[in-house]
Image (cartoon, rainbow, N blue to C red):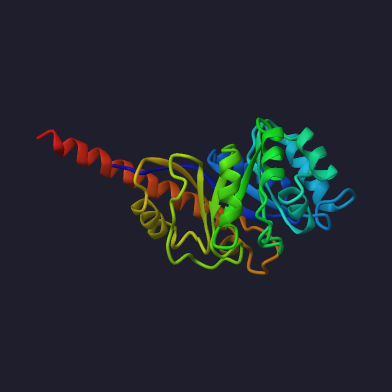
Amino acid sequence: MIKVEIGKISCCGANELLNQSDIISFLKRNPKAEIGIGVSEEKGGFGTPRFDFVKNLFSQLENGAIALHINGEWSNQIANLGEMPKELNDLIKLSPKKFRMQINFVGSGFANSDNADNLAKLVEKYFGKVKFIIPYGEKSSDFVNNLFLKTRNFDVLYDSSFGTGKAADSYPSKFAGKLVQGYAGGLSPENICEKLDNIEKIQNIKTPIWIDAESKLRKDDQNTLALEKSQKFVDSVLAWQEKRRNQEKSFCFFRQF
């Protein structure tokens, strides 16, 4: 039985160095794709090129195919204080339908809080417009477990490297059937099929997941996302999914005889 259904394929690390029309074309070609853009007060505040970059993308999109990855002090403000920065609140008002917002509070150095009350209230306040993504790993497990007790209106991302691009030694499935689960860490067009095989093995029920890649999808100068690499990544994921579906059909056919 196929145990994973891939909902989104996140290609992250885009910024204002990319042509916006190229991003729009990429998303139209790939309905399952999602473009991740890192923002912080320094790179995303009022008057910065990235704020205008995101605002203009939102104005051209009819769906929530852009995910904002919140870094720096903004991630602390959201995760620990339960406060939405004004710039992000303005972008939320401009966004097309619902989009996702990943709170990188561990990678930004804010990993010690075990009080999830404030974030839970914020998650509920913005539910219906924003779906929060919360990274889960050794450093954040207590925080996420506490958050889960208060709300289930968020997605969980398993990334033991917390954004450093290191491949995972193993893949958890703690929240299968309870939250939408994402997997990240060193994923690339070349290794994603093998990694998806491993991810599927640990699922005990059919569950929706998404796949998140960044470090292996950057341009050679590492300054921004490479859309050609992203296309190969998406194609590889979809090819894996199609292969598994064909295997399932063949298995069901032969069981009839």
Could you say which is closer to the camera, residue 229 or residue 93? Answer: 93
Tally of numbered discs: 0
Q: Quadrant of the N terminus?
A: top left
Could you say which is closer to the camera, residue 124 or residue 30? Answer: 124
Q: Is residue 147 visible?
A: yes
Point out residue 148 in the picture as x, y percentages from the top left corner: 56, 43
Point out residue 22 in the picture as x, y percentages from the top left corner: 67, 47
Q: Residue at x 50, y 61 (%)?
A: 188
Q: Quadrant of the C terminus?
A: top left
Q: Residue at x 36, y 55 (%)?
A: 197
Taking the image as shown, residue 169 lies to the left or right of residue 111, namely: left
Taking the image as shown, residue 105 lies to the left or right of residue 44, namely: left
Residue at the right extreme of this rendering: 47
Q: Residue at x 83, y 54 (%)?
A: 41
Could you say which is closer to the camera, residue 72 or residue 81? Answer: 81
Could you say which is closer to the camera, residue 150 or residue 165? Answer: 150
